Image (tube, rainbow, N blue to C red):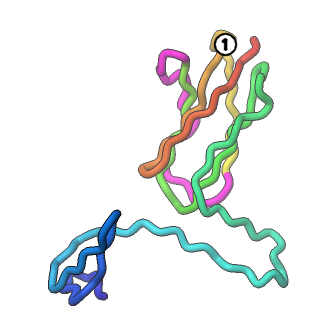
Amino acid sequence: MNFNNEILNQFLLWSNPKPVWYESAYFYFAIKAVLERQTSGVDDKGVHKFSTYGLFQNYPNPFNSETIIQYNLPMDDQVKIEAIDLLGRVVKELYSGFQKSGEHKLSFHAEGLSGGIYFIRMLTPSFSDIKKMVYLK
């Protein structure tokens, strides 16, 4: 197969429940993939694999004035991290931009906010997640 706008001579396309064969068709598409480095087990010191996106529960939770937000990116990607209230309004944007793959941490300082329940939201072009956090003023 050649993906440079060439004819794909023959390939199998499937989706539930039956496979379908196509011949001599033009297709234009993009593939977003995550490549993982496989280790031998001999020297794995400092090797971290982040094969999926992940937003973790903030800690501490409940918190008084500051809490830590941790998340993983399996590839370099655009990401937005924001705190939202119970009505879905963004009360603070913690990060918005491009980041390298790996583990990331942010501090959320809640000064100027009323005590109560808030949510931390992570958005990328292909992933979103929300975690609940409790601010004790």
In the rendered view, would you say 64 is above or below 32?
Answer: above
Asked which secondary structure carries label 1, the reply is strand
Q: Label 1: which residue?
A: 116
Q: Give the residue drawn at x 58%, y 61%.
A: 74
Image quadrant for the N terminus? Answer: bottom left
Using the rendered image of the protein, determine whether residue 102 is visible from the camera's viewpoint.
yes
Question: Is 89 located above or below residue 20 in the figure?
Answer: above
Q: Horizontally, is 47 left or right of 18 in the view?
A: right
Q: Position of residue 91 (x, y in %)?
A: 54, 21
Q: Give above or below for 92 relative to 94.
A: above
Magenta region, main secondary structure: strand
Q: Residue furthest front?
A: 17
**Quadrant in the picture for residue 62:** top right
Can residue 96 be seen here? The reply is no
Q: Label 1 amino acid?
A: Gly
Q: Position of residue 56 (x, y in %)?
A: 68, 42
In the image, the segment drawn in magenta is 86-103
Q: Residues within 10 Å of mark 1 (few under 14, many from 20)?
A: few
Instruction: Please state the horizontal and vertical placement of residue 9, each as a whole percent of the image.
Output: 21, 89
What count of labels does the image hold?
1
Q: Residue at x 30, y 69 (%)?
A: 18
Q: In the rendered view of the protein, which quadrant contains the C terminus?
A: top right
Q: Residue 114 versus residue 16: which sits nearer the camera?
A: 16
